[in-house]
């Protein structure tokens, strides 16, 4: 088992900052059991803990948690567990949902300065690349399982990616380890289990070095993706959420696609399918500044306004028509459009007695007129918002503060001119509006 220990030691030593505190994502299966035991056999032995997440998906999950606790104690390592039930949602992959919940839980369990380790190996890499290829992934997906990437405040590393499943099982037997066999791993209704049980044996029988060669290809895809990312940043170096259409039109179609994909990844947006991406690319060719275009897909949307492309998460449902809320010094307001509280102002603001009495919070119906402090005339509110460059889809989501039937503040953008004459000798108050999309 010297090769496994040597490979593990080198992988850990090459991590950024040469960390000495690790946490193993510990399911109790053979792979994570070997990883935890192997770390304990390194010289010098690093600081390591075992982190277990119980989804409650199997009737024996509580028994498995106790076995993991006992295994960690036998190795003399710290142990933390968290129960995070996962329920099936129609139309969603239970595997993907459990993985998302698990990594969120591991983020909470990870201590400052710790690097999270998972026990993914070369056969996992082969399965992942093959699955993604069958699902039509691009270069980014064909990178497979990354050996290292940012995670929480630190990193997530996979130091066993160079080892095969056979080598890991051989180490488990050689060291006399016991591990948990999850029967769900044999359920071939799940895609990954089907690939593992039905496809991989046939592939490796014909091509014994498949895991190693696919791992090498995945590494090359990671380098190719890095080149694509650098090209995207060079082509559109600004804000990924707001991209000038003129910048995109100067690029070839393939480079436009690359910039859009790169921007969506930076923003954490899911990728549109080919049809939706094509629709978005066609919309970029519309050159009228007054064109208003929207392309939507699950989890994301793109809008064009004043020849600028906005890449966004879908907005939550707005407050109902005719809504009226309340905000005052003693009572902040919150709703789908964000949160409002009143804070002391060093300059112009709302009179103290008005703030104490409070304001009603409403939203645009159309036809409102307004005169901000320092402006000579009243104009339709729509004109002020257009002049400020507020996109049309956000204008109806700006909270309007009324005193009786008089509009006295528009979000945290403007205070009414009428407030300046009534401030008196007491310090004024200003509107602090948070938790809302950027307006410009």
Image (tube, rainbow, N blue to C red):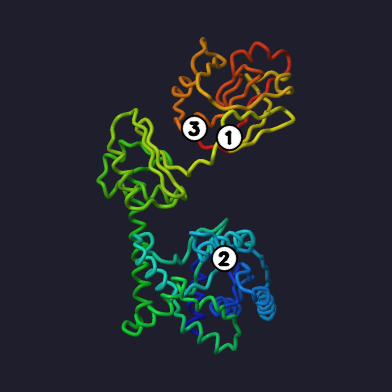
Mark 2 vs 3, N-terminal side = 2
When the figure is inspected, residue 125 is found, relative to residue 431, above or below; the finding is below
Q: Secondary structure at mark 1?
A: loop
Q: Nearer the viewer, residue 321 or 384?
A: 321
Q: Mark 2, mark 3: which one is toward the viewer?
A: 3
Mark 2 vs 1, N-terminal side = 2
Q: Secondary structure at mark 3?
A: helix
Gap in angstroms between the C-alphas marked 2 and 3: 40 Å
Q: Which mark is residue 140?
A: none
Q: Secondary structure at mark 2?
A: strand
Residue found at the far left of this picture? 252
Q: Mark 3, mark 1: which one is toward the viewer?
A: 1
Residue 303 sits in quarter = top left
Q: Which mark is residue 394?
A: 3
Horizontal placement of 340 versus 202: left or right?
right
Q: Which mark is residue 319?
A: 1
Gap in angstroms between the C-alphas marked 3 and 1: 13 Å
Residue in the image at 49% along x and 17% along y: 380
Gap in angstroms between the C-alphas marked 2 and 1: 42 Å
Horizontal placement of 29 versus 308: left or right?
right
Mark 3 vs 1, N-terminal side = 1
Circle 3/circle 1 CB separation < 8 Å: no
Q: Nearer the viewer, residue 141 or 300?
A: 300
Q: Nearer the viewer, residue 369 or 415?
A: 369
Q: Disc 2 marks which residue? A: 116
Horizontal placement of 257 versus 31: left or right?
left
Residue 175 picture location, percent across and down: 58, 87
Circle 2/circle 1 CB separation < 8 Å: no
Horizontal placement of 173 versus 54: left or right?
left
Q: Residues within 10 Å of mark 2 (few under 14, many from 20)?
A: many
């Amino acid at each position: 088992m010297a090769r496994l220990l040597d490979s593990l030691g080198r992988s850990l030593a090459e991590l950024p900052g040469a960390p000495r505190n690790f946490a193993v994502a510990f399911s109790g299966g053979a792979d994570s059991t070997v990883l935890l035991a192997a770390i304990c056999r390194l010289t010098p032995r690093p600081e390591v803990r075992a982190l277990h997440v119980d989804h409650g998906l199997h009737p024996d999950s509580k028994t498995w948690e106790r076995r993991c606790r006992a295994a960690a104690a036998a190795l003399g390592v710290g142990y933390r567990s968290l129960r995070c039930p996962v329920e099936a949602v129609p139309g969603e992959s239970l595997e993907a949902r459990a993985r998302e919940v698990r990594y969120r839980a591991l983020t909470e369990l990870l201590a400052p300065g710790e690097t999270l380790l998972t026990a993914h190996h070369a056969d996992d890499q082969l399965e992942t690349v093959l699955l993604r290829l069958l699902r039509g992934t691009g270069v980014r997906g064909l990178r497979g399982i990354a050996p290292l990437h940012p995670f929480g405040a630190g990193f997530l590393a996979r130091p066993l990616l160079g080892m095969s499943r056979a080598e890991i099982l051989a180490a488990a037997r050689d060291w006399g380890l016991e591990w948990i066999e999850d029967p769900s791993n044999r359920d071939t209704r799940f895609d990954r289990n089907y690939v593992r049980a039905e496809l991989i044996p046939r592939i490796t029988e014909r091509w014994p070095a498949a895991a190693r060669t696919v791992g090498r290809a995945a590494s090359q895809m990671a380098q190719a993706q890095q080149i694509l990312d650098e090209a995207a940043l060079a082509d559109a170096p600004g804000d990924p959420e707001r991209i000038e259409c003129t910048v995109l039109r100067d690029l070839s179609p393939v480079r436009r696609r690359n910039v859009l994909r790169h921007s969506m990844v930076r923003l954490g947006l899911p990728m549109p399918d080919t049809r939706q991406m094509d629709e978005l690319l066609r919309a970029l060719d519309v050159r009228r500044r007054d064109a208003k275009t929207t392309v939507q897909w699950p989890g994301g949307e793109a809008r064009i306004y004043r020849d600028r492309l906005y890449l966004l998460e879908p907005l939550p449902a707005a407050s109902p028509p005719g809504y009226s809320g309340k905000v005052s010094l003693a009572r902040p307001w919150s709703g789908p459009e964000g949160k409002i509280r009143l804070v002391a102002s060093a300059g112009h603001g709302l009179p103290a007695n008005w703030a104490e009495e409070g304001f009603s919070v409403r939203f645009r119906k159309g036809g409102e007129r307004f005169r901000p402090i320092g402006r000579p005339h009243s104009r339709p509110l729509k004109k002020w918002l257009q002049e400020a460059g507020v996109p049309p889809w956000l204008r109806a989501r700006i909270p309007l503060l009324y005193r009786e039937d008089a509009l006295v503040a528009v979000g945290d953008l403007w205070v009414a001119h009428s407030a300046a004459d009534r401030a008196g000798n007491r310090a004024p108050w200003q509107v602090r509006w948070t938790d809302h999309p950027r307006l410009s």
